[in-house]
Image (tube, rainbow, N blue to C red):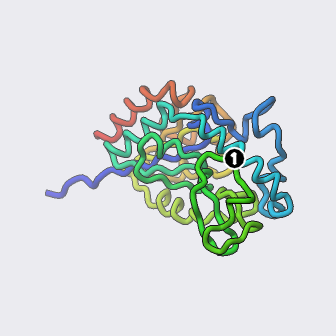
Amino acid sequence: MTGTPQRRLVVFSGSGVSADSGLDTFRTSGGESLWAQYDPQVVCNFDCWEKNFSLVHEFYSRRREELGQAAPNAAHFLAVDWERRFGAELITQNVDDLFERAGARAVLHVHGYLPALRCMSCGAQWLIGYRRFSPETDRCPKCGRLESVKPNVVFFNEPAPRYAEMWRSLESLTANDVLAVIGTSGLVLPIGEIARRSPATTILSNLRPAASPRDRDFDHVLHGRAAEIAPDLDRLMTELMDR
């Protein structure tokens, strides 16, 4: 007798997952938020980051300090629980390390990893943690250069090398699998279109209805703060994965 193929679960997350941990979201923050104090086209632009070297590192130093004060919330712990129970593949657009701090074994960060630096000259990568960048001490440990040291975050107009892994995972989903999309506006990656074309059972968990991704692109939709609706999301996921 042929057994039922193992059901895969892919969890694709955006900044809404970490908003309940106090981290600013680029698309929705305003007022006194960190994002509102800097021009993203200056501090997050690959075409001019070297010209704005000091300002770029000032901005990302502040983001690391902000991250150091944050803690994982219920949505992070839920995804980690799914990784343990269902072998969930965790794909995130977030550059924070809150999934890892919640206990995740493997997270695909498609837009980079904030607690690390990268040398654009030799390709070396190393951890800086949550502290500020220092020109005196944070030269590349491999080649010794300073001017090529960049936050290990994908900027506008910069290739995203881990997209290939992301697309392989998303495009290999079958009708037996589940795709859960949590806390993303869908403005950077067309996750609504991806879900609409996917043969998998699809779930959307976002704060409120939005133009993109559209609720009708998904089989199941839950609205509310990711951390607050985690129990409802878990009940739905358990039902789907135990079929």
Q: Nearer the viewer, residue 82 or 148?
A: 148
Which x, y percent locates residue 6?
Answer: 29, 53
Residue drawn at 52 percent across, 47 percent down: 12
Residue drawn at 53 percent across, 53 percent down: 197
Which x, y percent locates residue 174?
Answer: 40, 55
Would residue 197 be found to the left or right of residue 42 on screen?
Answer: left
Residue drawn at 59 percent across, 43 percent down: 14
Image vertical order of residue 54 relative to residue 81, above or below: below
Q: Quadrant of the N terminus?
A: bottom left
Q: Amino acid at mark 1?
A: Leu
Would residue 243 be found to the left or right of residue 82 on screen?
Answer: left
Question: How many labels were placed on the picture?
Answer: 1
Q: Is residue 98 visible?
A: yes
Q: Nearer the viewer, residue 242 or 58?
A: 58
Image vertical order of residue 162 relative to residue 31, above or below: below
Would residue 91 be found to the left or right of residue 50 on screen?
Answer: left
Read off the residue under disc 1: 187
For mark 1, give the secondary structure.
loop
Which x, y percent locates residue 150?
Answer: 71, 61
Quadrant in which residue 85 is drawn: top left
Crowding at dot 1, Cα within 10 Å, few <14 / some 14-19 / many 20+, comes out as: few
Quadrant in which residue 151 is drawn: bottom right
Q: Quadrant of the C terminus?
A: top left
Q: Is residue 215 visible?
A: no
